[in-house]
Amino acid sequence: MTGTSETLRGDVLVRARDLQVHFPVRAGGLRRKRVGAVRAVDGVDLEVRRGETLGLVGESGCGKSTLGNALLRLVEPTGGTVEFDGTDVTALGKRDLRALRRRAVMVFQDPYASLDPRTTVGQTVAEPLEVHGLHPGRQARAARVAELLELVGMDPSVASRYPHEFSGGQRQRVGIARALAGEPDFVVCDEAIASLDVSVQAQVLNLLRRLQRQLGLTYLFVSHDLSAVRHVSDRIAVMYLGRVVEVGTAEQVSGDPQHPYTRALLSAVPVPDPVRERRRERIVLAGDVPSASKVPSGCRFRTRCPHAFEPCPDVDPALQEVRGGQAAACHLHGVVGVGDRADAVR
Ligand code: SF4
């Protein structure tokens, strides 16, 4: 959420290579046999650079939340690797995993569901301190809880109150205070503003932005809402059916998208200027997103792509650089020698 060119040059904090999360599909009676797999994340290569906000966008069910969870090893990858600050987290044992849980955390979508209604705000925020053995002793812990509540713009006196006494925005602040308790480097914000009113969304985004500047945080901002993502992100990765199909700076991806799916997503975002809004051309995709247990052959977007051509059903396009820092997984960009078509479809 800093948007600085310095951030864009930063080194890599989190790197996924050919990351896969496949969930088995079983059928039959008592001895339920594996009959297939839901390929929620299906060969993702992704880098999150230190200090940046990487927006991860795609329709619901495209695998973006599973990817966020897999980067933190909150779900177990079934293939590939995730490096956090140079260490392969897929190979970590219990103790090292606990250290990772301190440095890499999640802010959840639903502040109503993620807070225990029987636990006070103070106990909620103190929980990670206890788990990680930080600020031992009641007084030291209470002082740290007060500090964290102030950090997210809440009065420390709310520590003795319960979640139901607060609005959605305030509960999300409590969730953020808890996430920051262990002084993390990396925060996955999983649809963190989706369940809030629009006016509250802006406040929470401003808070996240301030915290990033103040604490030097790195964010993966997961959302189905491309207009929110492009306003908060330094770079954007677009996901379709378990795979990243485009990545680049926020300006590149939202100003000159290189993948037909990104173009379709952008064409659905309303424009504030009424004249431009009237002229906005909508790209309506054919059909629904295929099931992640029946991923189409070749390019997985081909069943809905208005530009599909000969190689698309047979050859799976790799994510390849189109121009400085922007990459797309599409044959229109010359994998099979048809580069000229990319300009023809704009
Ligand atoms: Fe469309 Fe083919 Fe490009 Fe896939 S590879 S996005 S089907 S043109």
Image (cartoon, rainbow, N blue to C red):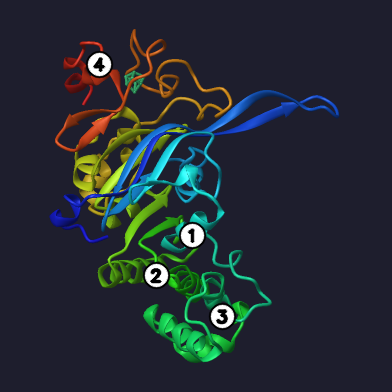
Label 2 close to label 3 by CB (< 8 Å): no
Give the number of the mark in front: 1 or 4.
1
User: Which amino acid type is shown beneath numbered disc 3?
Assistant: Val
Up the image or down, 234 lies above or below 139; here it is above
Counting other residues with Cα less than 10 Å from the Cα at mark 4, is it few (<14), some (14-19), or many (20 or more)? some
- Indicate the position of residue 153 as horizontal and vertical percent values: 39, 81
Q: Earlier in the sequence, mark 3 or mark 1?
A: 1
Q: Which mark is residue 183?
A: 2
Residue 282 in view in this figure: no
Q: CA distance from mark 3 to mark 4?
A: 54 Å
Residue 37 drawn above or below residue 223: above
Asked if disc 4 and disc 2 are in contact, CB closer than 8 Å, the reply is no
Quadrant into which the C terminus falls? top left
Query: Residue at position x 28%, y 35% from top?
Result: 281
Between circles 3 and 1, the one closer to the viewer is 1
The answer to whether the residues at label 3 and label 4 have Cβ atoms under 8 Å apart is no
Q: Earlier in the sequence, mark 3 or mark 4?
A: 3
Calculate the distance from the C-alpha at mark 2 to the C-alpha at mark 1.
Answer: 11 Å
Front: mark 2 or 3: 2
Residue that badge 3 annotates: 121
Q: Which residue is identified by label 1?
A: 101
Q: Compare marks 4 and 2 and give the one earlier in the sequence.
A: 2
Dot 1, how many residues are within 10 Å of its Cα: few (below 14), some (14-19), or many (20+)?
some
Amino acid type indicated by mark 1: Arg
Compute the Cα span from label 1 to label 4: 40 Å
Gap in Å between the C-alphas at discs 4 and 2? 44 Å
Cα distance between the residues tagged 3 and 1: 21 Å
